Amino acid sequence: MANTSAPSGNTDWTLADFLSTYRYWALFLSSLLLAIGGQGLSTVLPLISQMTGSSAQTIGIFYSGSTLGWGVGAFLAFVVASRHARSALIYPLVICAVVAISFLPAPALWGSPSFLFLFGLALGAVRAVFPLAIAIFLVSGRPGKIDFGCALTLMSTTILISAIAPIGASWLSQFDPGGLPVVVGFLACLLLAVILLLPAEQLTFDEAPRPRHRPLTPRRRSPLLVAFILSIPPILGFLMGLGIYLFQANGFDVISSPVTLLPTLLALGIVLAVFIYFAFWVYRIHGELAGAAQSQRLVTPLAAMLIAILVPLGLAVLVMTLGDLLNDRARNAGQRPLVSIGWLGIWSFVFPPIAIAMVQNAANDSYVVGSGTA
């Protein structure tokens, strides 16, 4: 099996290198906190301003300032971040927090056009500098196209997660229509973001990545069996939904009937077992591919398992990376690609068990003769 590890002097970063650093996850979580706090506050801000008697035109001043803030954020990202990476992110957060704090002792400032413009400018700058600066930081590691795209895609999932922010902001605003709990929550998000960024000595990736290797003994598995096991939860969900519909159509009370308790508990147990198997598979496949040939493109098994479970689109990114790695190994050995990246990407989003089975099948073909079976 060809060794696909990067030479020791190579400073090109891979997706696995990014995901194995504290700074990447500090950037991810701080971006997530900023997205949640900013989205939540922006949602209820018109209501808060109306409570102070502000007109729609006054509220529009905030959004005008926010738009101009994107220009300030772009300047910070392209000019300051390349030289003072951490300062380019932390200082805008602190300034935005200071402006927001001024609203706490003087709620009437929500109706002040000048303060709304200043706050919009600060918030817009913060929301602009993060995605632009993060892209610059990732590029500094000179990653390949797929590695850069996957790393940036995972970062962009913070926008998807922040969609829950308006729900939380609406719930907080019920305690005080003046918006005090929402502002406090926004400040808490900014404070946590700063705390996460402070331990990172540098945020760029221009140094050589740290070598990693967590090998496990390669084992061949049946792709059909893997796909079947991981397909059990959606199949169970469909059958249970169909059963509930048929029983209710015949006038049977499914919800309160004790007869359905045992099948429900059994189904939950099966789903839990499948979830454990899924985590086991992700852990093993990364360690086994490392055992077949060392590579800087592989995340450590534990990190891969956590990413697949906790990070939105994490599984899709990991599967795509594994498929690309296996194809590279096949090409280095003078063979044709083992898996279609196009179909792998499609199934990763449409029905992940099939994508996982495709990776397992490609892994089986890549292992040296004599590997065990499981």
Image: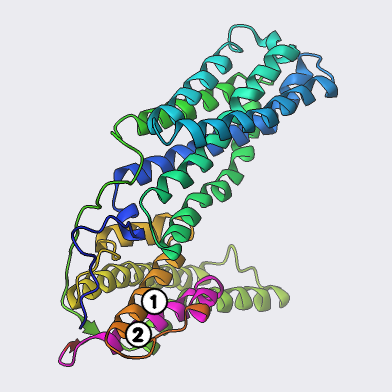
The quadrant of the picture occupied by the N terminus is bottom left
Question: What residue lies at 38% left-to-right and 58% top-to-bottom?
Answer: 143
Q: Residue furthest top?
A: 105
Question: What residue lies at 37% left-to-right and 87% top-to-bottom?
Answer: 223
Q: Please state if 46 lies on the left or on the right of 99 as rendered.
A: right
Q: Foreground: 367 or 166?
A: 367
293 up-or-down from 121: above or below: below
Q: Main secondary structure of the magenta part?
A: helix
Q: Foreground: 92 or 252?
A: 92
Viewer can see residue 8:
yes
The quadrant of the picture occupied by the C terminus is bottom left
Question: What residue lies at 29% left-to-right and 82% top-to-bottom?
Answer: 332
Q: Please state if 96 lies on the left or on the right of 360 as rendered.
A: right
Q: Position of residue 344 (x, y in %)?
A: 48, 78
27 up-or-down from 86: above or below: below
Residue at image mark 1: 323
Helix, strand or loop at label 2? It is helix
Q: Please state if 235 lies on the left or on the right of 301 as rendered.
A: right
Question: What residue lies at 69% left-to-right and 31% top-to-bottom?
Answer: 67
Sequence-wise first label, 1 or 2: 1
Q: Quadrant of residue 150?
A: bottom left
134 up-or-down from 1: above or below: above
Q: Amino acid at mark 2?
A: Ala
Residue at image mark 2: 362
Report the magenta residues as a range: 343-370
Crowding near the residue tagged with mark 1, few <14, some 14–19, many ≥20 C-alpha atoms within 10 Å: many
Q: Are marks 1 and 2 in contact (CB under 8 Å)?
A: yes
Q: Position of residue 267 (x, y in %)?
A: 45, 72
Q: Foreground: 359 or 15?
A: 15
In whole angstroms, how far apart are the C-alphas of marks 1 and 2? 8 Å
